[in-house]
Image (cartoon, rainbow, N blue to C red):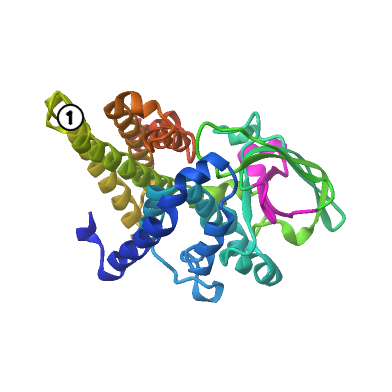
Amino acid sequence: MDFSLNEEQMLMRRTIAEFVDKEVVPVAQELDEKGEFPMLLFRKLGELGYLAMRYPEQCGGVNASMTTYCIFCEELARGSMSLAACAAMQSLMGTNFLYRFGTKEHKERLLIPALKGEKIAAFALTEPDAGSDLGAIRTTAHRKGDEWVLNGSKTWVTSGTQAHFFTVLASTDKSKGLEGLDFFLVEKNTPGLSVGRKIGKLGVRASENTELALDDVCIPEKNLLGEEQGKGFVYLQEILNSIRVMTGALALGIGRAAYEEGLKYAKQRVQFGRPIGKFQAIQFKLADMATELEAARLLVYRAAWLLDQGKPNTKEAAMAKLYASEAANKIADETCRIHASYGFSMDYAAQRYFRDARFLLPGAGTSEILRLIIGRELGL
């Protein structure tokens, strides 16, 4: 879909693609095997300005459009979904509320260093019993003098082991359900805050996910991230479509990588005297993969364009994330099938794409939740 991009965006794609090919692809397998936060590459992304690109110049960014941001996410995921997950957390969810609602001191001390890759941000939303159902959140925050006191637990906190600060969702009024939720800034080493175990995962293993416990964590009143109390869910809704489109772009990237791996193998692998790509059965697989990839691309970048234009996009964002994530998983599966027994071997990248693609299914809304959203937008 490059025909829809302007010259600056096409240059951006070439630039980040060159970085990925040179710096990321050669170490992607090693990152997966070690399962450690990709600190060197992460900091390099910060030094190059990629983590700040969505933010204004005073924060070190360039006010990049959602379309441009999707290009970045797509290309990075093509190289390593682990690195892309860390970068996406930092450049969107982990820093968004601090940028919108943090004090000047917060921004100078935490936000700007985070956008340079010098500090790491995390987003603590999910709980053991509250994922899609945010109304079930049990983490609470109550006022005590000029402080807030937080109690509860979180899970699946991306970059939690490395984070210098967390954006934490808590209930300030249980009787109000979703209308009683708020976001809070909680810094590392705050008494009562403890990072729990690192969660072992099937894929995206260099993006570390942890549990988080809050036991009478006292923070200043100014650490409430919002213009008024009880608007946390509203604020989250304002960026959910961006998160979904971004996740669709990540899916597009890993889908591309898996497709290209399958295509390359089909041209190289010889059976019965000719490359397996000459057999109709394999050709049909690759034809379907290429078609689904193109359809995903059109959905993702149309949704990004709608966001850039300020047009209604809830349905399109849900469709983009739903289709692109499901397509990426199907493409990764077919690539493993094309590789046959070698698709089961850790010596080939096919298995990593298969494992990493599954990371995209629950994030930003499960496929089931997204179908409900689309149905609602259709007036059902």
Query: How many numbered callouts?
Result: 1
Magenta span covers which residues?
160-189
Residue occupying image coordinates x 38% and y 36%: 348
Residue at the spot of label 1 = 276
The quadrant in which residue 274 appears is: top left
- Looking at the image, residue 228 sits to the left or right of residue 298; the answer is right
Residue occupying image coordinates x 23% and y 44%: 294
Label 1's element? helix
Whether residue 166 is in magenta: the answer is yes
Asked if residue 343 is positioned above or below residue 292 in the image, the reply reads above
Please state which amino acid type lies under the numbered disc 1.
Answer: Ile
The picture places residue 192, in percent across and down from the top left corner, at 83, 46
Q: Residues within 10 Å of mark 1 (few under 14, many from 20)?
A: many
The picture places residue 272, in percent across and down from the top left corner, at 14, 23
Asked if residue 54 is positioned above or below residue 93 in the image, the reply reads below
The picture places residue 178, in percent across and down from the top left corner, at 61, 40
Q: Nearer the viewer, residue 330 or 215?
A: 330
Residue occupying image coordinates x 19% and y 59%: 3
